[in-house]
Image: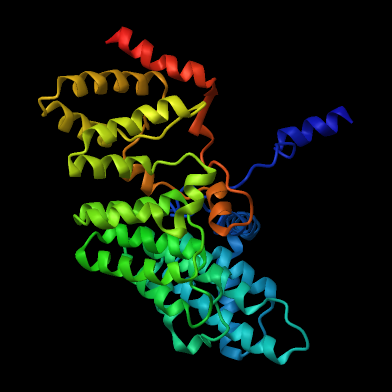
Amino acid sequence: MFRLCKNMASLGLLKPNKLIVNKDTCRHFFNPLVLNLLDFQQQQEHWQRRAGHSKERFFTRVEDALKKHDRLFTEDIKVLCCLANKENEFKLAIESMNRYLEDQDKSTFQTLSYNAAGEMLLSMLHIHKQDQLAYSWFLDEKCNVNIFGRNKECFLLMMDLLYECGRYQDVLSLLSQSEQYIDRRFPDLVTITLAALYKLNTPDSLAQLHTLLGELCLNPIQLTSRSAMYCALLAYNQGDIDMIREIPHLPLFAMCYRKMINPLSNIDILTYTELGRYEDAVDILKDVIVRFKKSAYIFFPEVIAKLESAVMSTDNIRLQDEFKVVHKALKLGQFMYYSSMDEFLSRQVSYKEYDMLMNTKNPRQFNKQTFAFKRSSESNKTLLTEAKQIT
């Protein structure tokens, strides 16, 4: 028995199973787990290992089957999508899928649903960054658009791929088209649309944001603080201060203030700084230090730097001294973010945040690093005292 185990270990058969992640793929707006790409990548790894040197023979057999109108089986389609890595192979996979579904309609039962087929094709094209081919297939009327690849998951995969390839205007157009097939008010679809509007950062994108928010407020859904940040920062970049002040009060973002610590205080600080209400901005900082019982990354460095520059340019010595004390307390209490706002908004939407977007669970913190340690309210108040001593 010992010798058997030793031989299996030498062959690598006793190695623990690991989650297979394709490190060569692009950074997805949504976490690959959210997009169900990890399952596809595991299948891809499995079939690539099994195919070995027989890949070319397999593709030749599939091409012959198409020419002779022979039937393609479910395993053939799955293996084809997993092994394809060239443009001609991608096109072969799409053609084979269409033929497979036509034959399946004539059979007595359905093995692979239309939506599952669409997700499989889009996963293949997403992993290989084939945005143009995927977009052309997605809009192709020949693909029986009423039922093939037009569920929420397919739209999310397609929009995520377009977003990662910088095709933000196409993301917006897909949201408009989605209402023909699904409820386009799904929080995840709305979030990636808001991200695309933020990336465009034009007067026209701000006008589109006005229209979209107006439609959503008629029958509100709940969005995360990240979505609110997209809206507010787009308005800030376009100089629409009035809109910024109204965004936190929209019913779409009510859950952000009630259930979780969020970075929306940065928007208030930026707005007050623009309006010259520096004392109100400093009061927000003091309130956070005293109120929260846990260390939390809330304020971004560029926001504090902008407020500091504005305060130090005034003649109010008392306010300047007060800001210095509060600034020290923020650093002591670990309330400063480690990244910029743009980096925060460009990172992946994690699985926990996705739960909140879909409203499937109670809202939770979307970053385990948000809270570093616990402390009492009294110890929070002493931070200001400690900061004064340091100053």
**Residue 353 visible in image:** yes
Front one among 98 and 296 = 296
Report if residue 85 is visible in the image.
no
Please identify the residue farthest to the top as the structure is shown: 389
Name the residue at 54% across, 44% down. Answer: 259
Which residue of the protein is positioned furthest toward the right in this rendering?
A: 1
Position of residue 192 in the picture relative to residue 323 (left or right): right
Using residue 289 as the reference point, say whether residue 148 is left or right of it: right
**Viewport quadrant of the C terminus:** top left
Residue in view at x 48 percent, y 53 percent: 254
Q: For residue 199, which quarter of the picture?
A: bottom left
The spot of residue 105 in percent (x, y) is 68, 89
Which of the 4 image quadrants contains residue 86?
Answer: bottom left
Residue lying at 44% horizontally and 18% vertically, measured from the top left: 381
The percent position of residue 112, horizontal first and vertical second, equals 68, 76
Q: Nearer the viewer, residue 374 or 158?
A: 374
**Residue 377 location (% of width, % of height):** 51, 22
State whether residue 339 is above or below residue 88.
above
- Front residue of 282/64: it is 282
- Indicate the position of residue 270 as horizontal and vertical percent values: 25, 42
